[in-house]
């Protein structure tokens, strides 16, 4: 029996709320069952998580600090999804971006331009890490789902190796009891942010999510991306006369 998945032609309003809500509920139930199976009180665990994450100003700020990089990492995959390229490697890009950023931060930590240099290095690291899967996809037709997913584990173990596996540039040579990374200079990371600034950054992330979603649904750029996907499909049949194809996009 062959099973195929097709995109809905129309999405009802309740799908936009019901599907994410049901996903959260289902994930909570599965997590609770796992906790109970391992001998933990699921209700107590979820209660403690809620109290520490959302009932104090420090907890809210810490939650937003952890969630904001993940929000922007998720945005990085939206454009690829729009042209039917299912990149699962955003996690690996985040790891390698961190490696590049920390390396530059260690090198120029006492400079006034340390923070911009660290940000640029993080971007370059993410781009470099995704170059090889992109070339495999473009030249050999290799599924980007497989390559980017495997690259996540490579990036994770690479990050661990740089600290735990050998005496590398990132490892602190003075840490004798337990391997640790070198500490970055405060100029490379210590932005003085108030709680209001943290809320603004999180709000900006949510706003960018909405803008990116609208851009990829209704703009001329979204139409061009859909055409690019169709042209890629047509190109399989006529790669020599690709410029002669006329593509009608929905």
Image: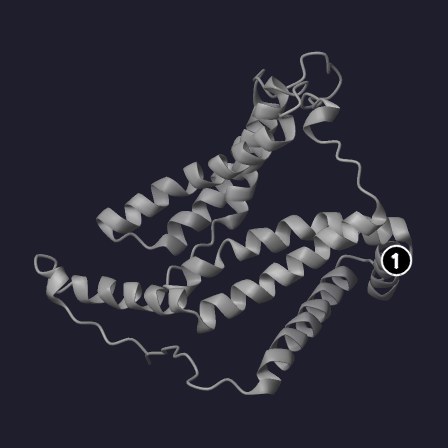
Q: Which image quadrant: the C terminus?
A: bottom left
Locate residue 235: give its quadrant: bottom left
Is 177 situated above or below 78? above
Foreground pick, 16 / 112: 112
In the image, residue 22 lies at what x, y percent?
Answer: 66, 77
**Where the N terminus falls, by quadrant?**
bottom left
What residue occupies the far left of the structure in this picture?
240
Q: In this rendered view, identify the residue nearer to me: 34 or 105.
A: 105
Q: Residue at x 56, y 39 (%)?
A: 95
Residue appearing at x 53%, y 67% in the figure = 213
**The quarter of the displayed image where residue 180 is located:** top right
Counting from the top left corner in percent of width and height, residue 25 is at 70, 73
Assess disc 1: are there few (<14), some (14-19) or many (≥20) residues with their C-alpha within 10 Å of its C-alpha.
Answer: few
Residue at horizontal 29%, vertical 52%?
A: 142
- As drawn, is 59 to the left or to the right of 141? right
Residue drawn 39% across the image and 52% down it: 146
**x%, y% of residue 4?**
36, 78
Q: State whether residue 139 is above or below residue 22.
A: above
Residue designated by label 1: 48
Name above or below for residue 6 compared with residue 87: below
């Amino acid at each position: 029996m062959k099973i195929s998945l097709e995109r809905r032609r129309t999405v009802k309003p309740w799908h936009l709320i019901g599907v994410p809500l049901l996903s959260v509920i289902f994930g909570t139930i599965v997590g609770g069952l796992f906790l109970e199976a391992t001998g933990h009180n699921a209700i107590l665990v979820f209660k403690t998580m809620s109290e520490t994450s959302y009932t104090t100003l420090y907890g809210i700020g810490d939650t937003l600090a952890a969630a904001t990089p993940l929000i922007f990492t998720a945005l990085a995959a939206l454009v690829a999804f729009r042209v039917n390229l299912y990149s699962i490697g955003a996690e690996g890009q985040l790891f390698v971006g961190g490696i590049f950023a920390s390396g530059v931060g260690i090198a120029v930590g006492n400079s006034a331009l340390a923070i911009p240099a660290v940000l640029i290095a993080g971007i370059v690291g993410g781009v470099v890490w995704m170059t090889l899967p992109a070339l495999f996809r473009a030249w050999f037709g290799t599924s980007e789902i497989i390559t980017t997913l495997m690259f996540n584990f490579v990036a994770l173990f690479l990050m661990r190796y740089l600290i735990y596996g050998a005496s590398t540039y990132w490892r602190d040579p003075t840490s004798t009891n337990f391997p640790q990374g070198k500490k970055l200079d405060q100029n490379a990371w210590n932005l003085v942010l108030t709680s209001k600034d943290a809320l603004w950054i999180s709000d900006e992330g949510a706003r960018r999510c909405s803008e990116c979603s609208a851009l990829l649904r209704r703009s001329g750029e979204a139409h061009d991306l859909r055409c690019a996907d169709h042209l890629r499909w047509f190109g399989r049949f006529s790669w020599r006369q690709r410029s002669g194809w006329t593509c009608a996009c929905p």
